Every structure is written in structure tokens, then in C-alpha cells.
Amino acid sequence: MVLDPKHTRQIRIDAVGGPVDLSGRTIGVSMPCPGCRYDLRGVPATSHCPECGLDITQVLASAVDPTVHRLPPLASPRAVGDGIVLTSLALASGVVLPVVGVLWAGAATVSGQMGVSTPVMESLTTLAAVLVATTGLAGCWSLKPRGAGPLQQVARRAVVLCATGCLLMVGGLVSVLIEGSWFMIGGLLAAGGGLMTSLAGLRAVLLEAGRRCRAFRTATFQRQRITPLLLATALASLALPASRVADMAGQQTIVLTLGAIGLIAASMLAVGLIYLVNNAIWIRRALRQPPPRLTELLD
Ligand SMILES: [Zn+2]
């Protein structure tokens, strides 16, 4: 936004074709004031909301996103949005549900109710495997390349990596349910490897589609980066199996240390994946309902 040198109410804001002078312009569409929901249609663009006094120029600047309209359009933005949400939901459920199961089992053991812990843990892990398989593959179907566009190349790689990763995660989660330490160790390694493969595949699509979402582009604290997720996955999927190996060797101090490290890393990973789902929902919303152009809002 640029104030003119005379510091009058003549203000220009950034738009697709360059800065637009708002003097003499009025709001031409029905548009609720973000402060008080008053309909701003007909209100001068350089004035204030008649009800709550909010600066209309600020309202306009936050309603439009010229960056989005300068980018090349995606071939099928709705399918990409659905694919990002479904894939991140699959990955999140593959971690969040088993972690909740383990924490539940820990709490049940502490309170002396060990009998209920195993069935709950098994049910949540089974549900996780089913959700990873169904939503993960549905997400890959939505992400498959459709026509030309900036995602054509990365989408193909994303689908291959996400589908392979989700299948590995399902195999890992099922293996964890089977009796025996080696099934548990192999299952944890497979689930971790699968998650890392899927995240690597999703990253390029997420970043390219995310350029079209101002909330994602500008968020700092609430934006989940993929690298910390990969690091937490690597830590959890090495520490937890190593803890099992130490258990087989009778090294109880190492079991507890590695188990605690693995569980903390897995819990942080679960929180990070919930943030990732939230980011995916932002991007899906921006792809389905792109922000208006400034010219569409003014008379
Ligand atoms: Zn208002």
C-alpha cells in the first residue's frame, strides 16, 4: 500500500496489473465488514466503515491477493486441494492414532488397568492402518496429474512416492500388531520409512499449491515445514526399534531412555502432522475459492 506524497486519502494498493488508485472509487459488491459485518457496498474505498470505523483500504488490501493471480493456474485446483488434505490426513492418522494408543496404554498401566490397554492400542493401530490405506490412496487419486500446468511433473512423482509410502505405512502398522519383537521392529522401521517417503512426495505439491494461499505463504508459527517432520520421523523410527533391541538384550536403562526419546519424537511428530492437516485445509480453501481481484470489488 502506498500513501501519496501529500498524505491525503489518495491511496494506491497493489493489484495484478500494478498499483490501483482508490480515490473516487467505491465498494461495488456486497462485502461484509470484517470488524462488524456491516455491508460495505457503496462505501468509498478510501474512507472508514460507517459502523465500526475500520479502514476500508486495509479491508481491501487484506481481501485481495495479487500474488495468486500472477501465478500460472493449476490444471485442476479442486482435485489438488482435496489430494493435499486427504494425503496429509492419511499420514496424520497413521501417527496420531498409534501414539494416542501408546499414551493411553501408559496411563492405563500407571492406574493399574493393564487389561484394557492392549485392546485399545490394537484397535487404534488397526484403525490407523485402515485410514492410511483408504484416505492415502484416495489422496493419491486426487493428486494424479491432469492436463498441463505447473504441477504436471511434480504431481507424478508425488503420487508414486505417496502411494508407495502409504503402502509401506500400512504394512508397518499391520506388522506392529503381530506378536513378536522382530515384527514390531520391522513394522516401526517400515512405518517410519513409509512416512518419510510420503512426506518427500507431498512436499513439492504442497509448496507449489501453497504459493496460491496467502495464509500458508505468510504464516510463520502455524506453518508446518516438512524438514522437522522428516527429522522427527527418523528419530522416532530409529529410537523405538532400538529400544526393542535393547529390551531383547536385557538392557533396561537403555530401553527406558530410547523408549522415552522415541515416544517424545513420535508425539512431536503427531502434533506437527496435525498442523500439516490444518495447513492443507487452508490451501484447499484458497484453491477452491481464490481471492477476488481488486477490480471485481470496486465500482
Ligand atoms: Zn465495520
Image: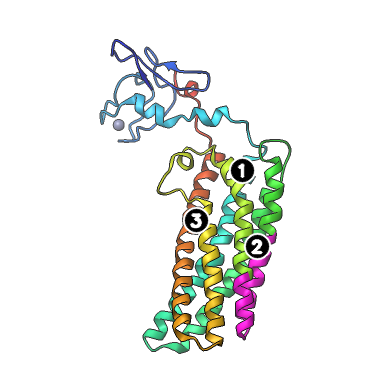
Q: Amino acid at mark 2?
A: Cys
Using the image, tell me which numbered label, if any, was put on residue 78.
1
Eye-nearest disc, 1 or 3: 3
Please give the residue where the numbered disc 3 appears in the rendered image.
228
The kind of secondary structure the magenta stretch mainly shows is: helix
Q: Is residue 68 above or below residue 190?
A: above
Residue 186 in magenta? yes
Q: Amino acid at mark 1?
A: Arg
Q: Amino acid at mark 3?
A: Pro
Whether pointer 1 and pointer 3 mark residues with C-beta atoms closer than 8 Å, the reply is no
Residue 238 vs residue 298: left or right? right
Q: Residue at x 66, y 49 (%)?
A: 143
Find residue 68 and report its horizontal and vertical position in percent: 54, 32
Q: Looking at the image, is mark 2 or mark 1 earlier in the sequence?
A: 1
Find residue 164 and report its horizontal and vertical position in percent: 70, 60
Report helix, strand or loop for mark 1. helix
Write down the region rendered in magenta: 164-189
Residue 151 vs residue 231: left or right? right
Residues at marks 2 and 3, CA–CA distance in whole angstroms: 19 Å
Using the image, tell me which numbered label, if any, was put on residue 55.
none
Residue 98 vs residue 202: left or right? left
Q: Residue at x 52, y 72 (%)?
A: 239
Quarter of the displayed picture in which ligand 1 can be seen: top left
